């Protein structure tokens, strides 16, 4: 495949995978609610929160790749860093949720009656995962590139 | 490195490749299914006030609800509890038969308020009685001192008279068993089966219903409990038990009458797991649910209900000959 075609296709595919990784945990909860007969609206709040975050981060990740593309001495550095960031995002976006909701069940149950904090907690945890992924991606890219390469963006 | 590949690139690429494979396997096979199966998202407790003691219990009539595996305190548990409260408004009942696993994610003592008081507050305030079939502490936990402390805490906090006991409500004699005893369906039977045999023999009420956590018949994730059909079923047959209610598997399932006994699993109190069909299955659905039972005279009507109020199953039993 020609390099310019790869350059055109790969970033949006990466952004789509990035979006999916953020969305899947909320889809799992929503599908469980649907299977359980909880009513159509249950789980939509988490789905919307993850969708919003996923769209924002997909755009951000795409922009990061475009920026790195302009300054990268070696194109491979950009993609290696991007894959590392995606792994951190995939793990963080799900494992943080599991860890916090499972390990601190009683602490956050007390806020449940107020409704929105559950969504805020969900969003906050996924935001932490996004930040970790962004830091990983940028640090790995800087680490791989030869010294003196301009910082992207 | 040759051809311009740096050591750092190799390291970072290897970490990325290994991480991708491990993450895909971990998330895809374990974590996402776990997230879909468990009830980890906190839920709002039902905010309802029910008319106290609105039910009718006479020597020929009683209504009760059975629910199992409802101990998460999460969204799904709250949804089931809310529909139980709404069902009380439509068709009041005075008893909830808990079919075990009433507390997940921690000790019952610590989580009593979260998993029992909050979701079931409207029913507690309405004066509904709770009958418990012990179910927690499956597998290795049930052998430990910790498990006995948990069971004792459950009995004390719920005011349950014993590990296994009989309760009479109107025309129904309810036999609540402790199927968590190690080896109870094997060689280490203990006193419970002798007690059950005697208690059923003495029962003179029109209806005999047994509740326990581990299902003798199931097409679900755990399946039929090994040994239960050999050890328990002969006693149930001997005394013409009408209905057996169980949990453990997180779905709804009703069997055809097996030697005159109908077996129902209502283990979808807060989680769901997949269910298939067996030759004994009449209805099976992987869904959150509870069972509303209304007994009047020689008719018992069961209605399995989802949290959105949808009815999964309706069935009717007729009292045994001579009762």
Image: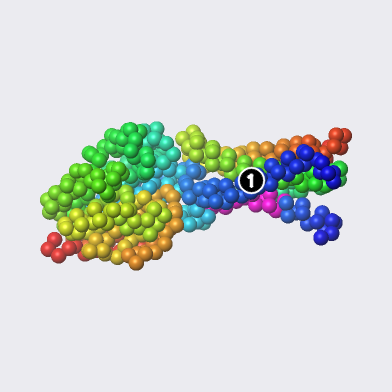
The picture places residue B122, in percent across and down from the top left corner, at: 36, 43
* Above or below A109: residue B31: below
Which chain letter matches label 1?
Answer: A
How many residues crowd mark 1 within 10 Å: few (<14), some (14–19), many (20+)?
many
Horizontal arrangement in the rendering, residue A84 relative to residue B163 (left or right): right
The picture places residue B305, in percent across and down from the top left corner, at: 38, 57
Q: Residue furthest front?
A: B2
Q: Is residue A24 magenta?
A: yes
The image's colour scheme reads rainbow
Q: How would you classify the magenta stretch by its main secondary structure?
A: helix
Read off the residue under disc 1.
A90
Number of numbered callouts drawn:
1
Judge whether residue A48 can be spotted in this image. no
**Dividing the image into 4 quarters, which one contains the N terminus of chain A?**
bottom right
User: Residue A6, located in which quarter of the rendered image?
Assistant: bottom right
Horizontal arrangement in the rendering, residue A73 relative to residue A45 (left or right): right
**Dividing the image into 4 quarters, which one contains the C terminus of chain A?**
top right
In depth, the one of B199 and A142 nearer the eye is: A142
The picture places residue B323, in percent across and down from the top left corner, at: 13, 61
Q: Which residues are magenta?
A: A15-30
Q: Is residue A18 magenta?
A: yes
In depth, the one of B149 and A107 nearer the eye is: B149
The picture places residue B172, in percent across and down from the top left corner, at: 20, 53
* Label 1 element class: helix
In depth, the one of B188 and B37 nearer the eye is: B188
Q: Residue at x 78, y 57 (%)?
A: A9
Horizontal arrangement in the rendering, residue A107 relative to residue B254 (left or right): right
Q: Residue at x 26, y 63 (%)?
A: B258
Judge whether residue A77 can be spotted in this image. yes
Q: Residue at x 20, y 48 (%)?
A: B193
Q: Residue at x 57, y 51 (%)?
A: B28
């Amino acid at each position: 495949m020609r390099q310019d075609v790869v350059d055109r296709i790969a970033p949006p595919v990466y952004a789509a995978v990035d979006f999916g990784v953020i969305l899947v945990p909320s889809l799992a909860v929503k599908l469980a609610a649907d299977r359980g007969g909880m009513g159509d609206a249950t789980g939509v709040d988490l789905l919307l929160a993850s969708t919003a975050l996923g769209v924002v981060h997909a755009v951000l990740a795409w922009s990061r790749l475009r920026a790195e593309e302009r300054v990268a001495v070696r194109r491979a550095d950009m993609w290696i860093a991007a894959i590392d960031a995606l792994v951190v995002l995939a793990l963080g976006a799900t494992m943080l949720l599991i860890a916090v909701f499972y390990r601190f069940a009683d602490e956050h149950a007390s806020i449940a009656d107020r409704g929105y904090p559950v969504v805020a907690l969900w969003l906050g945890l996924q935001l932490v995962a996004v930040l970790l992924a962004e830091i990983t991606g940028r640090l790995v890219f800087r680490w791989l590139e030869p010294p003196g390469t301009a910082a992207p963006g | 490195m040759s051809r311009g590949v740096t050591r750092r690139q190799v390291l970072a690429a290897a970490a990325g490749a290994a991480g991708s494979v491990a993450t895909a396997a971990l998330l895809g096979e374990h974590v996402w299914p776990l997230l879909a199966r468990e009830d980890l998202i906190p839920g709002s407790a039902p905010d309802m006030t029910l008319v106290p003691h609105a039910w009718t219990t006479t020597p020929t009539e009683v209504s009760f609800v059975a629910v199992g595996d409802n101990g998460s305190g999460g969204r799904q548990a709250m949804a089931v509890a809310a529909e139980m409260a709404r069902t009380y408004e439509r068709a009041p009942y005075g008893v909830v038969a808990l079919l075990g696993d009433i507390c997940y994610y921690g000790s019952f003592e610590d989580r009593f308020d979260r998993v029992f008081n909050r979701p079931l507050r409207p029913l507690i305030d309405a004066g509904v009685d709770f009958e418990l079939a012990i179910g927690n502490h499956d597998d290795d936990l049930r052998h430990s001192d910790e498990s006995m402390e948990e069971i004792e805490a459950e009995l004390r906090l719920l005011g349950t008279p014993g590990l296994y006991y009989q309760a009479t409500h109107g025309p129904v004699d309810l036999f609540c068993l402790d199927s968590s005893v190690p080896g109870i369906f094997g060689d280490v039977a203990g006193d419970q089966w002798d007690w059950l045999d005697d208690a059923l023999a003495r029962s003179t009420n029109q209806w005999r219903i047994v509740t326990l956590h581990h299902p003798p018949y199931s097409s679900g994730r755990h399946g039929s409990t090994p040994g239960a059909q050999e050890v328990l079923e002969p006693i149930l047959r001997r005394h013409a038990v009408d209905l057996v209610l169980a949990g453990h598997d997180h779905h709804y399932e009703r069997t055809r009458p097996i030697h005159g006994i109908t077996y129902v699993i209502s283990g979808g109190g807060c989680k769901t797991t997949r269910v298939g069909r067996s030759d004994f299955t009449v209805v099976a659905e992987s869904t959150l649910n509870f069972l509303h039972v209304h007994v009047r005279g020689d008719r018992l009507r069961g209605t399995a209900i989802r949290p959105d109020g949808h009815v999964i199953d309706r069935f009717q039993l007729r009292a045994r000959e001579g009762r």
